[in-house]
Amino acid sequence: MASPSPLNLGGCSQQQYDELIAALGPQQPASVAVALCNIFTTRDRTTEVAFGLNTVFMILSGALVFIMHGGFAMLEAGAIRSKNAMNILLQTVLDGAASALMWYLVGYGFAYGVGDNPNGFIGDADFALARYASHNPGAGGYPNWTAWFFQWAFCATAATIPAGAVAERFNFNAYLGYSLFLGGFVYPVVVHWVWCPTGWLGYLGQSPLLGTGMIDFAGSGVVHMVGGLAGLTGAALVGPRLGRFDMDGRPVPMPGHSAILVVLGTVLLWFGWYGFNPGSALTADTPNAAIIAGRAAVTTTLSGAAGGLTCLLLGFVRHVAWDLISLCNGMLVGFVSITAGCHVLEPWAALIAGAVGAVVFELSCALLLRLRVDDVVSAGPMHGLCGAWGVVIVGLLAKQEYVQQAYVRDDYPYGLFYGGGGKLLASQVIGILAIGGWVMGTMGPFFLAFRAAGALRISAEDEHTGLDVSKHGGSAYHLHPQGGGGAFHTGAGAGGAGLTHMGLGLYHTGLGSAEGGEGHEPQHSHLHTMAGKAGVGDSIMRGATLGFANGGGISYHHSVGGGNFSSHHPTVHSVASNHSAGVTMGLGPVPVSPVAAIMGAAAAGGHGGAGMTNGFAGGAMTNAGPAGPAGARARGSNGEVMLVDVAAGPSREGGIKPIAAPAPGAPAPATPGGVGDASPSHGGGSVAPAQAARPAAVTGPAAAAEGAEQ
């Protein structure tokens, strides 16, 4: 055993000192051995600190990315109607769980697994974390466990993007299958192409495509294009929501129920993007990595700002109004557009990325409407097409200095507009085509198989009722509006039922006859049947024509009997100040003068109406016998009161009996049970009768009405 050193060993252990003395030989002084020992010890400790720092950096970045899940949940819930909010929230949480399971079992192996015979198409090892060990530092200076977690957060993001595109009509079973399929196979294959060292498309391979490979730093193509195009494919194949387009193919607005949730979701996504883009530096222990992460944070901020302001201005030009939703969409468009090149674009180029992305978004949204594709939250244009733009701009404006700093290669191609030639741009375009072809080529047949089995879309009745009630046993909101007393159920047994939910601006009517009705079109019905054998939604009492509206946008009229009146026909769309809704009921297919109950909603500037009546007066309406008339009262501009008496007798065909309105100025006839104060169709509160909107003239089987289902 070597003799103890006469010197202070510092941080060097006696064992390390002895090993160095043996290696250096006795001719070297002890001081040299001590100095070398301390150098090596310091380096080892620095490595350990860097290892821990990188681990913390990756875990925090992954957690920030996962916060985006909450952002998607809030944004999508606010962008749809309240009757489907629980469904979209369930799907968003489901995506996180399903993607975690599939990422563990096969996804990570398909994406990053490199076995004995690696290939450029798909990974072939590390399934279910088979080769992982806690002491393995991994290839990036952090544990393999950390890499798995960070990359799963990206997988979950890609999986949840399509939820908003197919909202409000997609079968939950089909959505569950989609989430497992995309998270376990479709997305991991693209990751392997671009981000795995053995992938054929990325820049990390020994022989990258065209000598460059595709640069996608944080996933404009790998994450956002995959999710956006999957959602766009699903939206096109499942078809639009009922009532989204009129008979002439014109889009009918269906606004979301909460701008507050949209803003909250946007801010959460904005916050999470600082893990998405800067976190893709993957390490924080070198000056280059720190510079890249910082630059990514700056360019992400600037691109989002440019996209938001551009969309805001474009919205003002179109609508002469400063639209909040346009600003939110534009911010997200800017973030998507910079994600691929946030590390190699200059700040001014980031502004261009966001601004041009906003234009791409607006044009693509308009194109989809012309094609009658109902993408509820514009996920296809925002993530799919703007993701493609984000990939392209790297080939145009990637700065040479930044590229060399990021990839430590002096000969690496850079942006075309900087004189870098067209190789990088060509690689980017090839990458876009490959990703687009793969996603649509796999998800298209998947959705078509479900559609062929009749399992892609929910029934028309469930769509009218809302997925929360029809599929999930409840509602995202449990409110008790003033005046109206909440929900009133009228009708039972084989005759169906009616539901009035005035406080939320909902007016759902269900007057059903068992298997009755002629010439009805279930796929275009906007009528609920709530109980008994009422059957499909538009199987109402034979020979009756019913039109109704829910406030805030559009109404729909349905003919059930004569066949000479167009079902699914839009009337006047409410723009800004006038919000009215009407119920018209006529007798038979012959031209008669129907009775209309006009219900108006308050609007800014006093142009609204008296609001909706609080509910059906009187007792329950049944098919077992007379239970008393059920009347609904609404005030017109001159104070007229019009009653509609719906009486359902033992006959399945029933009847609709109009009651003539009293002369102008005459007192309003009382209705059994009384009618409370009118409340606006968009929520609680009362409206003075003096501000009532004039009822629309009724000359045919239906009356004009406005408002959109909420």
Image (spheres, rainbow, N blue to C red):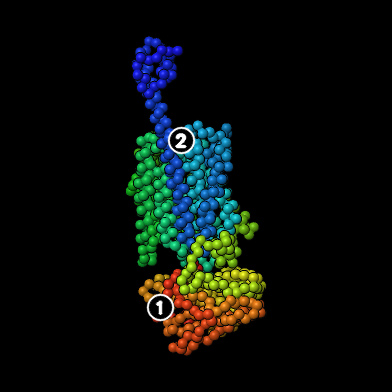
| Residue assigned mark 2 | 142
- Residue 424 x %, y %: 43, 42
Mark 1 secondary-structure assignment: loop
Report the front residue among 562 and 417.
562
The quadrant of the image that shows the N terminus is: top left
Farthest residue, direction left = 348
Q: Position of residue 91 (x, y in %)?
A: 53, 55
First in residue order: circle 1 vs circle 2: 2
Q: Is residue 290 left or right of residue 164?
A: left
Query: Going by the picture, which residue comes out furthest to the top?
Result: 27
Determine crowd level at label 1: few under 14, some 14-19, many 20+ residues with C-alpha closer than 10 A: some
Q: Are the two marked residues, 1 and 2, in contact with CB atoms closer than 8 angstroms?
A: no
Q: Looking at the picture, how far across and down is residue 549, in whole percent?
A: 50, 73
In space, the residues marked 1 and 2 are separated at their CA atoms by 67 Å
Q: Quadrant of residue 10?
A: top left
Q: Residue at x 42, y 49 (%)?
A: 272
| Picture mark count | 2
The answer to which quarter of the image holds residue 280 is top left
The amino acid type found where label 2 is placed reads Tyr
Q: Residue at x 66, y 79 (%)?
A: 650
Q: Is residue 707 visible?
A: no
Location of mark 1 (residue): 688
Q: Which residue occupies 64% across, 80% down?
A: 625
Question: What crowding class fits label 2: few (fewer than 14 Cα within 10 Å), some (14-19), or many (20 or more)?
Answer: many
Q: Mark 1 belongs to which amino acid?
A: Ala
Q: Is residue 531 above or below residue 3?
A: below
Residue 540 left/right relative to 252:
right
Q: What residue is drawn where x is 65% and y is 77%? A: 624
